[in-house]
Amino acid sequence: MTDNSLAGAQRIAAAQNGQWQPLPHISSAALRWGLNAAALIYLVLVYFSVDINWARVAQGLDRGVAFMASFFSPDFITRGGEIAIGLRESLTMTFVATVLGIALAIPVGLGAARNIAPAPVYYFCRAIIALSRTFQEIIIAILFVAMFGFGPLAGVMTLAFATIGFMAKLLAEDIEDAQRDPMEAVRATGASWLQWINYAVQPQVMPRLIGLSLYRLDINFRESAIIGIVGAGGIGATLNTSINRYDYDTSAAVLLVIIGIVLCSEYLSGYVRKWTA
Amino acid sequence: MPLMMNNKTPVWRRREPLAQRLIWLAYFLTVLLFLLCWKIVSDNTIWEFLADAHIQAASLIGRMIPPQWSISGSLLLPLWDTINIATVGTALGVLIAFPLAFLAARNTSPHPALRAFALAVIVSSRSINALIWAILLVTIVGPGLLAGMIAIALRSIGFVGKLLYEAIEEIQVTPVEAVTATGAGRMQILNYAVLPQIMPAFAGITVYRWDINIRESTVLGLVGAGGIGLQMNAAINNLAWAQVSMVFVLIFATVILSEWVSAKVRHAVI
Amino acid sequence: MLKLTGLTKRYATGDLALNDISLSVPAGQVLALIGPSGAGKSTLIRCVNRLVEPTAGAVELDGRDISKVRGGALRQARRQIGMIFQNYALVERLSVMENVLSGRLAYVGFWRSYFRKFPANDVKQAYRLLARVGLESMLDKRSDALSGGQKQRVGIARALMQNPKLLLVDEPTASLDPKTSRQIMRLICELCQEQNLATIINIHDVALAQQFVHRVVGLRAGEIVYDGSPDGLTPDILTTIYGEEDWSLTHQDSGKQSDNDQNDDVEAAIMGGHP
């Protein structure tokens, strides 16, 4: 305390004589230099563990340039049929999986909100969420393909499973942040549990729930473009094949289609959010 | 809201009749679309495979338990690689996203054309999953960590760029006005009035993306872009499910840890 | 010192905020701009330092028209005009000292300001100004840790850091309690006297304005409807400016308040510089 005020008095005196610099963000000099040194050491370690093969990189640069160039000459036609089928499959998978996922996420989300769920239910639902959020869609897809065989069903299951973790977590957080007064007021009227959820909780979380659903629809579509790589249907298979064939014009076409759809969905969700807000 | 007279008895409805009908129509269309999509999915599914799905699942899980703990030592180096991919990738992505966000924000963009360009870069980067970038980069720079790092960086640009430019657009205007009124130059205004306001958001977004990138970099090895995914891919190809589950355990632990770190840091800066 | 001729501002929405305003303010004069909300007070002072672009008319500072200048010349013009804001407009996450030093931004280069390496004379001046407004011990505090009155003092110090010739003050007391409002108004007026600055103060509180300023300009719907001494503000004139209302209370009120002030020994002592 006295140390601080002494240092403060010194700084004031220095400022009076025209010397002033802002206080450093980390007040302890040892910690400050320690962190800098740690960052430097980390960079050196990373540099040695990356082990870049510059010859290979130089060789690949041509392909990189070719790929960039193909964005200006995308080929939608040659493999137009495959793109169309892949796209249709991606879109249908996305929609089914989002609806299913949200339908399942609502009970899980209710169960994972500490302020309305009893402890055992809370921990069970939180475990489901943690499991679903930790593993990338592609890992889940590999497992589901092994269980259900190739095809869009494995994809639907994958995306629905991922949707549960995502939506349930955000829904639960939303419910935990909901205002307590209306919840207590409705409970005080003698409403049943379902009535209570319907009147006190639902109105508070509904607008955000709709917004998040649209956002998740968007994410699911983007994810559907990759789970095809491991055989779970969708446009990912088309994309993967074209890249492996170095058929960058088709790859660029697929990527542009994905970008276009994501853009459209963003505009659309902006409007829907305005209506429902 | 609407209170209507029906045979002189007041009848209360929650919404205007038209609004209520529109909402029903939206529900109806959603259900219709769902059934249609479900039919397409179902037509492309070989349901016979599903008959023994529960047996498949049981045997898969049976072979996964217990995980093969003995290989955990050999997984530590790939795990280190995975963390490096995420960290360096995040750093690179943030480095590019930072100036891009200032070009993309309505209130700091120097020119509408530059703004459109920055927004296009951000949306392209956001639309394409890191795994797709990785597939591409493996064919371009060859398999390995470098491809993974660049893939993570390319995906992070859009995420960080979007959240950051939204933060820039939401800053308070009055400090900007005040610093402008002193006669400060454009860069000085950014440095003194804009930057201090967005720094907490910037730090939070970066750590949040790093957390997501840890998850994403665990699977980049599936397409040859380095990290623990390489071991996972090898184990899956050998149908060594006990090794696969060991990788899962490690991924789970790492992700939980990174989420904890990220939450701590975000609490500290906000 | 400051001379406005035919200043007009029409917003993109078509609203005419200022209609052919002509006004000149000599050095050392403190002018209060009063008028109802939406009369164009804020627009007027923002047209002077071009935070708002005037549609027509000239803004002359020391005989030089600054209403059309751009780039470096505009920054040169702005640095001669200090501005104090209603909501203090401090950069909350910067320290008090950084906020005050930001008044020197137009005098130092970018890299110098980036590394906070301000010339020793600037730092000395910043210290003197902070000492003048009574905050020298707070220089390392983050400005969001200050009270409203303290923030406004920092805002005043920042404006004076520019060594301005003209001071624009936008509702300096609107967010402050009555006592702090008085102290802030007194401080501003004293500093203007000390440095012989031309000053325009936008203010809602007529009684407060009457107590401190030399000259009052009443604005209504973008036009000047009164220009004269503070004592000339009769109920009739207030009605022209603000519309029909019983003004007798305002006058009584202002009289009472200044009585109170004079009875207060400490305050009376500080009020030595009061006109």
Image (cartoon, coloured by chain):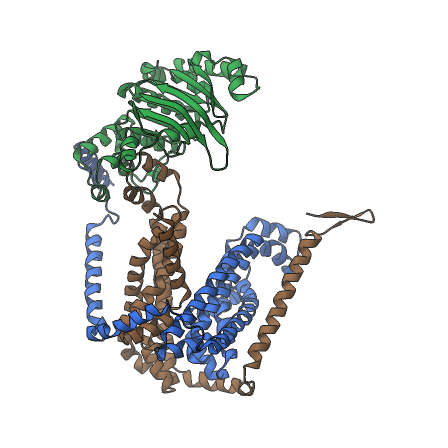
User: Quadrant of the rendered structure where residue C136 is?
Assistant: top left
Q: Residue at x 38, y 73 (%)?
A: A249
Q: How far across and down, in percent of the image, does residue B86 sit?
A: 31, 66
The residue furthest right is: B7
Is residue C203 toward the left or the right of residue A69 in the image?
Answer: right
Colour assignment, chain C: green
The residue nearer to you, when weighing B255 against C124, is C124
Q: Chain letter for brown?
A: B
Q: How far across and down, in percent of the image, does residue A136 sit?
A: 41, 72
Is residue C57 toward the left or the right of residue C15 in the image?
Answer: left
User: Quadrant of the rendered structure where residue B240 is?
Assistant: bottom left
User: Quadrant of the rendered structure where residue B227 is?
Assistant: bottom left
Reply above or below: B245 against A64: below
Is residue A195 toward the left or the right of residue B94 in the image?
Answer: right
Q: How far across and down, in percent of the image, does residue B48 sit?
A: 56, 88
Q: Residue at x 39, y 54 (%)?
A: B116
The residue nearer to you, when weighing C69 against A8, is C69
Reply above or below: B232 against C200: below
Residue B226 visible (yes or no): no
Is residue C243 toward the left or the right of residue A235 in the image?
Answer: right
How many numbered discs, if any?
0
Q: How far across and down, in percent of the image, does residue C115 sit?
A: 21, 44
Colour assignment, chain A: blue
Residue A74 visible (yes or no): yes
